[in-house]
Amino acid sequence: MRKAGPVWGSIGALLVATALTAPAMAQQDADVTAQILQEWMAAPQNRNDEAWLAEYARLQALGDMFETADDLMAAFTEAYDGGAPIDIANAPDWSGVYTRTSGGLQFDPDVGRGEPNTVRLNALGQAAVAAKTALIEQTGGEFDPISTCRPPGTPRIVTEPFLHDFAITPDVTYLINEMVNDIRRVYTDGRPHMAPEDAYPTWNGDSVGFWVNNDTLVFSTKYLRDGVYQRGTQPPYSDQVEVVERFHRVPETGNLESDMWVFDPVYLEHPWYTRQSWRELPNDDYLLRLAYWDCVESQNNDIIVTANGTSQFQNFDFLQNDQAVTNDPVVQAAAEDTAAIDVPVADFPTIGPVFQLNGEDAIINRITGIPVNPETGLPVGYHPAE
């Protein structure tokens, strides 16, 4: 059974208290596990009071019962007899245009800006966050991987503060983000995940699931690419990351909510539970519409990779001479030395020049934004025992 890791605040205290019962829970038979899951499905959805804090702790403890996303998904599948096909004539109404309800750019929306994350990392994950924190403290900036116009990918996609819409069909449900026309396809026609020998990592992976009570979508996602949960000191995730979600619309608020468990053996000591949410926007005049866009459409999004591994903009076309009006020395220097600020795609998976971070050579991993050792690819400052 897993051990509880470090946690913070009122939510953290409840996580610790709940985790104390986890060994006993792990020994219960399949019928009792099914009962736990049934209670979970019927749980209250008010996240603003003590009932929500207790529910948050219980859902984290539920994830802690399972070693892998496959194990958790198998428990859901058994508990609900594999679910049922959607009755499309009586399908839930997920129409409309949505945006993220709360959380800003925090992956866990119940964590305030600048507060420690509820994630429980292993040694490599802690080293990655420490290296990113050192970069921000040393430079005041960072390199965001989506600066090069790559998709955010899953699980980061749930944090993107843009317009979203959702479409239910008999066999596939579409979760759509207007940024780079990003679409997650959740197959509910009974197909299994792709066989490992046929699969390869993609931005949004392979998602399959089923419907419960004709209003709740339960699904798992695997075969994802590595990335980072969001900007700042939030951790990266690997290409072994897998996700289990429970997606439904809350009648009292009209919000769409997803209970999400992230499993990642590379960086996480335990699965990371969060509840994601999207609110419908008023659109009586139909002016809100999702529009495909990406950041290469405008030269105002040209990115400078600086000598210390951070990123900056250059050459705004709405200014005759942006170098002349800026006080940023990086932008000023860009006009004189364009060769030093190119973003060579061929440098994948690292980008930019080698620089010094805490007395060590560092280069930016362009997929995670983490400063890594140029030779080993491991986070700067991480020196596992030989």
Image: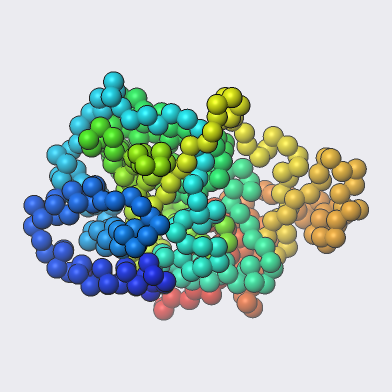
* Relative horizontal placement of residue 160, taking residue 320 as reference (left or right): left
* Relative horizontal placement of residue 318, taking residue 94 as reference (left or right): right
Classify residue 205 by image quadrant.
top left
Asked if residue 174 is positioned above or below residue 50 in the image, the reply reads above
Could you tell me which residue is drawn at 22 percent across and 35 percent down?
A: 213
The answer to whether residue 149 is visible is yes
Classify residue 365 by image quadrant.
bottom right
Could you tell me which residue is drawn at 69 percent across and 34 percent down?
A: 297
Applied colour scheme = rainbow
Asked if residue 40 is positioned above or below residue 9 in the image, the reply reads above
Toward the viewer: 50 or 262? 50
Q: Residue 342 at what x, y percent from top left?
A: 73, 50
Q: Residue 69 at what x, y percent from top left?
A: 28, 52
Q: Residue 57 at what x, y percent from top left?
A: 31, 63
Could you tell me which residue is drawn at 73 percent across and 45 percent down?
A: 302
Tally of numbered tags: 0
Q: Residue 29 at what x, y percent from top left?
A: 8, 57
Could you tell me which residue is drawn at 16 percent across and 63 percent down?
A: 26
The answer to whether residue 205 is visible is no
Name the quarter where the N terminus is drawn.
bottom left
* Relative horizontal placement of residue 333, taking residue 206 as reference (left or right): right
Asked if residue 306 is positioned above or below residue 222 in the image, the reply reads below
Classify residue 292 by image quadrant.
top right
Toward the viewer: 125 or 30? 30
Toward the viewer: 203 or 90? 90
Name the quarter where the C terminus is drawn.
bottom left
Toward the viewer: 147 or 279? 279
